[in-house]
Image (cartoon, rainbow, N blue to C red):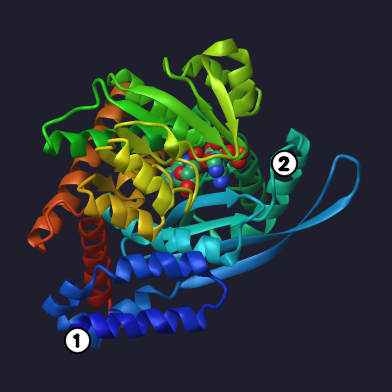
Amino acid sequence: MSKSDAQLSAIIDDVVRRNPAEPEFHQAVHEVLGCLGPVLDKHPEYVDQKVVERICEPERQVMFRVPWMTDSGEVRVNRGFRVEFNSQLGPYKGGLRFHPTVTLGTIKFLGFEQVFKNAITGQRIGGGKGGSDFDPKGRSDNEVMRFCQSFMTELYRYLGEHTDVPAGDIGVGGREIGYLFGQYKRITNRYESGVLTGKGLGWGGALVRTEATGYGTTFFVSEMLKVRGRSLDGQTVVISGSGNVAIYAIEKVTQLGGQVVACSDSSGYVHDPKGIDLDLLKQIKEVERGRVSDYAERRGGAAKFVQGSSIWQIPCTVALPCATQNELNEDDARALVSNGVIAVAEGANMPSTPEAVKVFQDAGVAFGPGKAANAGGVATSGLEMQQNHSRDRWSFEYTEEKLLQIMRCIHNLAYETAEEYGVPGDYVLGANIAGFVQVADAMMAMGLV
Ligand code: NDP
């Protein structure tokens, strides 16, 4: 073990010791720090100034009570979080997740990832993340509104368009952003458009933001295929999830000639060998807030719903995990490889376990980590902020073209950084190092922060 690797290993041990019961955060730190040995060899000043230790510690984290009332008058209490991880490159930026499994550790893992992801977008934004263990599933619009109002009544004091700018994530879409923005505006008496992104188009939102993460992941996988002399045209594609990221990944893959044969939700997956009917899926998921099992029913005999089993057993050449963390394990990766997968890009954050990533990399599969592959969402949030600041509105075509160029830049940055460090094709290493160096250099320049 090199001296730098030993130093990093000691830092990881310390992070685990000081942050007990946060396994996802440990996993994310492990993944990033595992790539940094060659960087520390090159930059002993980072070691002297304890830059890695500082980056692993959030600048600020808040936890708060969120009381609210159900339609039938029962009092409920949830917990709210905001972890403001790093503001060296710009205001904290990162989504809010509403899901019953959310803990401080979940938000810290997401916030940590966000720091490096945001850095490689080139948009001068820092990293943060927030959310709650509130479950919006099955709640009425009024209940969701009351929850969001209570949540923002505490959170507003930490936000600002130059301070901290949340967006959506799992369980937080346009409806929730609307309620959150409305409450922020009431409390502060400021129409501060740039304080939240993912807003409605009629009141400060940006075209393409809804589509951005799924489209961006698709652009990223196209770039990886291009390096190998291939394209998406004619590929058989499996996409997990059926939320915001998955739906727009299905849309763009289909536009580029791929055939998406399966998608899922937390109850199971649908296999539709002739290709997912996107209009029907959108109707069920975006309008009716239904389940993928409803999709299979309405497709008659064309599609099959399978409960509780792994979507990754379905043969495909391209796989896009777009649901949630650690949804694709070593066995799933082995099944994908033996079925002939050539490229995997993560639309979700950390959906592949470390063992799964190793299987892909050992098998020579092009593997795009979420930090790079799903950065189109936050990058387009950056474009929304630009439009808010200049009181401008860009067309769909103009914004999509910008997203495409940003995803190409991110791909090339990760690819070239991996080459520079002697591990060509390793996008995990390339993205981690490229993001880390930008943040580390800014920290060095700003004194002991
Ligand atoms: P949504 O809430 O819109 O959708 C999440 C989807 O994943 C739902 O279909 C959900 O099903 C499904 N899902 C959740 N848990 C599981 C599971 N264990 N197995 C199978 N399916 C599951 O969230 P998003 O699409 O916005 O986010 C998806 C991922 O992408 C997350 O990791 C998020 O952090 C990441 N991401 C999102 C960005 C964005 O712009 N939205 C930006 C960058 C990353 P069900 O309805 O049953 O819960």
Tell me the tag on residue 448: none
Q: Quadrant of residue 151?
A: bottom right
Horizontal and vertical percent position of residue 199: 51, 36
Pointer 2 local density, CA inside 10 Å: few below 14, some 14–19, many at least 20: many
Residue closer to the observer: 229 or 138: 229
Horizontal and vertical percent position of residue 353: 41, 56
Horizontal and vertical percent position of residue 94: 45, 53
Ligand 1 neighbours mark 1 (CB distance < 8 Å): no
The quarter of the picture where the C terminus appears is bottom left
Residue closer to the observer: 400 or 312: 312
The quarter of the picture where the N terminus appears is bottom left
Residue closer to the observer: 85 or 398: 85
- Is mark 2 in CB contact (under 8 Å) with mark 1? no
> Left of 218 or right of it: where is 25?
right
The residue sitting at 49% across, 83% down in the picture is 17
78, above or below 191, in the image: below
Q: Which residue is mark 2?
A: 144
260, above or below 344, in the image: above
Q: How many marks?
A: 2
Dot 2 or dot 1: first in sequence order is: 1
In three-dimensional space, the C-alpha distance between marks 2 and 1, rounded to whole angstroms, equals 52 Å
The residue sitting at 19% across, 27% down in the picture is 231
Q: Which residue is mark 1?
A: 3
Tag 1's secondary structure? Answer: helix
Kind of residue at disc 2: Val
The residue sitting at 24% across, 38% down in the picture is 342
Q: Residue furthest front?
A: 338
Kind of residue at disc 1: Lys
> Left of 254 or right of it: where is 65?
right
